Image (cartoon, rainbow, N blue to C red):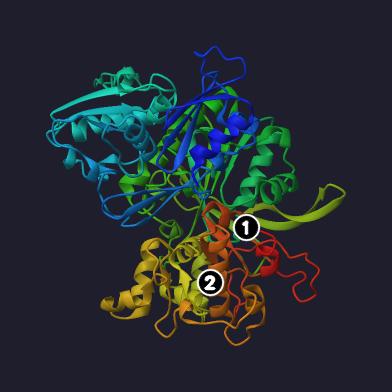
Amino acid sequence: MDSYAGVIEAFRNAGLYVDDKGNQAFCQGPGHSGQDRSVSVTRTQGCTLIHSFAGDRTEDVLAAVGLTTADLYDNKRGVDYCYPDGRVVHRSVDKKFRQSGNTEGSALYRADRLPDLTVTVYVAEGEKDADALATVLGVPAVSAAMGAQNPSKADWSPLSGRPVVAVVDDDAPGQRWADQIRELVGPIAESLRFVKAKVGKDAADHVAAGYGVADFIPADPTPRGRRLTLVNADQVEIEKIQWWEPGLIPSGSLTLLAGRGNAGKSTAAAAWAAIETRRGGHVLWLHSEESRSRHVKPKLVAAGADCTKVHFLEVTEEGTDARLSLPDDLPALRDLMSDNQIRFLVLDAVTSFKAGNKSGDKQDEIRPFLEGLNRLADDLGAVVLGIAHFNKGTGREARLLVTGSTAWTDVPRSVLGFARDDSTGGGVITDVKGNLVAVPRSLTYSFVTVTVPVGDDATEVGRVVFGEDTTTTVDDLLNRSRDEGSDEDDSPRGWLSRFLKNGPQPAVNVYAVGGEAGYSDRQLRNAHRNVCGRPENMKAFVKREPGSTTGPWVWRLPSQEWPWDKSTEEGSPIDDAAIDDKKPLYANLSNLYNLAGQKGFSDVIFEKNEDDIDAIDDITQETGHLGRHLPIDEPIPLIPVDLCECGDPAVENETLCLNCQLGGK
């Protein structure tokens, strides 16, 4: 579908005069003067750009002519940017990105279309900007994968000896990007100068407003001068540590809350947040794993929080939902907290808010993220609680069990370990870092059930009640559990074997669920090699569906067959999935792949009903998975979904059935 033609037709149907120049059109309202330009419509690769000269939001302009943001894309699922080395970057309608193909490649986008060395090449921050420059203005343009996040991983050698113009986004990340481009491209280019958009933030905005390359405004990427100054120790005033919770939570510092699933970390954070509101303070709760309405607020209400003093955060970019990315968004976050007198911040889970291209396992990549949170806490004198997970390792000290780099425990000033005590039904919290006090403190806690009103109904929610100090530590409980032994292998290999026991799974699902269970991507990959046997056999056990170059990689155990090798009975795919008793996994998987593809979905994840829900269905949306319930031989704990209410006695009060999930979509 040609989105450009569709948008032009909608404007004409709405009574606007359209001056269509082929790749760009200018639309005026009735009674136009011939010179007025109300809205511009611009065709680029796979999508259409809208610019309102009156400053109206794109969503409002589209709504006025009966369109939505999805109508700006030739493909309603978004646009694919194909790199010359096989990398494919997928941009969704709501500006979420994922990659496939050669994701380790270093080629520049559109590098294979560069002319001879005498022609000036434009460098833009993102693929959308490069396409706008190339397709509308007709100039050679390139960009690197991941935009401003990590240009150092790209191969800039195709720009060697060429005159280059870098178009800088008008924001803080754009300035940092420009500084890196100067260092990476400046030494090899024949010349390098920097410009910025005359209108809007980036090159796409500039082009959409009808401006050309001659209209760019010169930009100075030179960073502010730096100087080194000595400060004598006798000029520094000693400050006493201010404790928000004595021996556990210091003010002005980052505190990490770590433990295994169901240990009560976020429930305890809710109890502490409630105390802050009752003291008159304001709380900012940033969440990624739990639903705001079904999980976070009920926990806060159950804990007795004054919800008029609890705040959540919405992030938008170009009018669409986006995610907080730290440390890039730290200045804005600091200003927001300062302006609203917020001195208590919860990040649940803290790993969800680091920049997407930063590894949690690499110390030099995770330290700037955590150190930024420490500076924010120090600047505001605030409490910052970050919730993290223990891995399934065999280290006997709790601080060594935090998933990822040692920076997760090195940088925070306090690390609170959580462990359940099977003998009491409650648990123990211990300062497992213990470098702020002579004797680390341990505190008991228990769980109670509180009834929380929901409209005319009510629901039961867990609440943490803090008890007395104890000499029992989190290390004691973890070691006691380990010493008592278990018949279940909790190594990465043991977990993976159980996870794949019921059949092949897309690798993205293994990473998503394995991460929730406390295993890193590296541990899971190593476990898969061990499960499969010899490394040279890996290709036999990791495979895409035949004919697919962009679909998910699928993992299986050596003894299992590929799901697409199985045929199903004739008839409705949904009916086949429901009646195939012999091989429900294979039948459902192949049927669901077909149905999901027809309806615009991508990946599939197995679901089951959990009595004790920890993870929630929102995860399937945030990680881009299609959450669907499939019958499995032996239930395994994965991401739960809502209960089915379709009235079918065969599935009533079970997780959503295939008919309910796909039938009406």
Instruction: From this view, report whether residue 157 is shown above or below residue 483.
Output: above
How many residues crowd around disc 2 within 10 Å: few (fewer than 14), some, or many (20 or more)?
some
- Label 2 SS: helix
- The one nearer the camera, 323 or 339, is 323
Q: Mark 2 is on which residue type?
A: Ser
On screen, 634 above or below 138? below
> Where residue 616 is drawn, which disc sits there?
1
Residue 332 locus on image (x, y percent): 49, 28
| Residue 248 visible from this viewpoint | yes
| Left or right side of 412 for 11 | right
Residue at 37% across, 34% down: 132
Image quarter of the C terminus: bottom right
Choose top left, top right, bottom left or bottom right for residue 542: bottom left
Q: Is residue 271 left or right of residue 547?
A: right
- Judging depth in this view, the residue of 150 and 405 nearest the camera is 150
The spot of residue 342 in percent (x, y) is: 59, 29
Q: Residue at x 85, y 52 (%)?
A: 457
Mark nearer the N terminus (1 vs 2): 2
Which residue bears the numbered disc 2?
481
* Residue 148 picture location, percent across and down: 35, 37
Q: Nearer the viewer, mark 1 or mark 2?
A: 1
Q: CA distance from mark 1 to mark 2?
A: 27 Å
280 or 242, which lies in front? 280
Question: Would residue 657 be seen by someone viewing this image from the given angle?
Answer: no
Q: Amino acid at mark 1?
A: Ile
